[in-house]
Every structure is written in structure tokens, then in C-alpha cells.
Image (tube, rainbow, N blue to C red):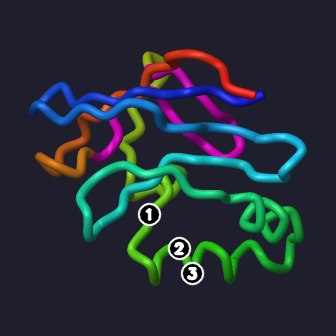
Amino acid sequence: MGLILDCACVHCDYYQEGILLGPVLPRGCFYFPALHADRKRIIQINISQYLEMHACPSSRENNEELARFKSEKKLPYFEQEMFEWNGSENEILSEMPHLQARYNYCPQCEQFGLQFEVWGPFE
């Protein structure tokens, strides 16, 4: 079971709802939020192949699935340039891959004020 997220920026009026985070069974999908750089909005991408490749130690540096996402201008929020670290005051929504509730990159104002909030579960 996964989570449905809403996101909003504390610096501007960017708001979006209905973003999926987590596994969808039995289809084998694992959804994760990402920035679509061309559209300047948050989307969900299926990172199940990324997770399979990431599990293999020899492929962590050159993950083909991550390279494909980047070539499509889809930047997952587990990438370090998509969030700022702000110590223990930030709730972690997903450990692996990393997703934090606050201090994420906003596609509209381009500051680190985007916050993800859990809205509910999905199956």
C-alpha cells in the first residue's frame, strides 16, 4: 500500500494534489514524485526499475533508469539537488529512496519551500 500526497510551496501559490508514493500491487509499480522540468510541475514516475538496478552494488553509479529519467527531464525528489537538508526538524516520508516532507525544490518559484503532505493511503 502506498500514500497519496499533496504538495504546496510556502513561498508562492504552487499547489498540487494526488501524487502517488509507494508500491502498487500486484502490478509491480513503485511511484515516486519527480519534477517535470519542461512542464514545471510535479509528476509521479514509476521507479521500480531504478530500485532493482540500485540494489545491485555495481550499478549504483551508472543507473540506466535514472539516466533515462534525466534525459526525459524528470528529476526524482530523491536526487540531492531537489531538496535541502535542514536537520532533525524535517519529517522523512520515505527512507529509501529518500523523500522529505519539507525543504523541497518548487517548480514555480525555484526555491526550496515545497512541502509534501500525506493525504491518505492508496492500494
Name the residue at 36% across, 42% down. Answer: 84
Say few, some or many: other residues with alpha carbon within 10 Å of mark 1 (under 14 / 14 to 19 / 20 or more): many
Please tell me whether mark 1 sits on a helix, a strand or a loop.
Answer: strand
Kind of residue indicated by mark 2: Phe
CA distance for labels 2 and 1 = 7 Å
The answer to whether the residues at label 3 and label 2 have Cβ atoms under 8 Å apart is yes
Residue 66, percent across and down?
60, 73
The answer to whether the residues at label 2 and label 1 have Cβ atoms under 8 Å apart is yes
Q: Which residue is mark 2?
A: 69
Closer to the N terminus: mark 2 or mark 1? 2
Residue 112, percent across and down?
25, 41
Q: Which residue is mark 3?
A: 68
Kind of residue indicated by mark 1: Leu
Q: In the figure, is residue 31 to the left or right of 70?
A: right
Q: Which residue is mark 1?
A: 75
Magenta region, residue range: 90-105
CA distance for labels 1 and 3 = 10 Å
Please tell me whether mark 3 sits on a helix, a strand or a loop.
Answer: helix
Say few, some or many: other residues with alpha carbon within 10 Å of mark 2 (under 14 / 14 to 19 / 20 or more): some
Q: Nearer the viewer, residue 88 or 33?
A: 33
Q: Is residue 119 above or below residue 83?
A: above
Closer to the N terminus: mark 1 or mark 3? 3
Name the residue at 58% across, 16% down. Answer: 120
Location of residue 48 by image quarter: bottom right
Name the residue at 86% across, 71% down. Answer: 57
Instruction: Report the disc number at residue 83.
Output: none
Q: Is residue 96 above or below residue 59?
A: above
Location of residue 10 by image quarter: top left
Q: In the figure, is residue 96 to the left or right of 18?
A: right
CA distance for labels 3 and 2 = 4 Å
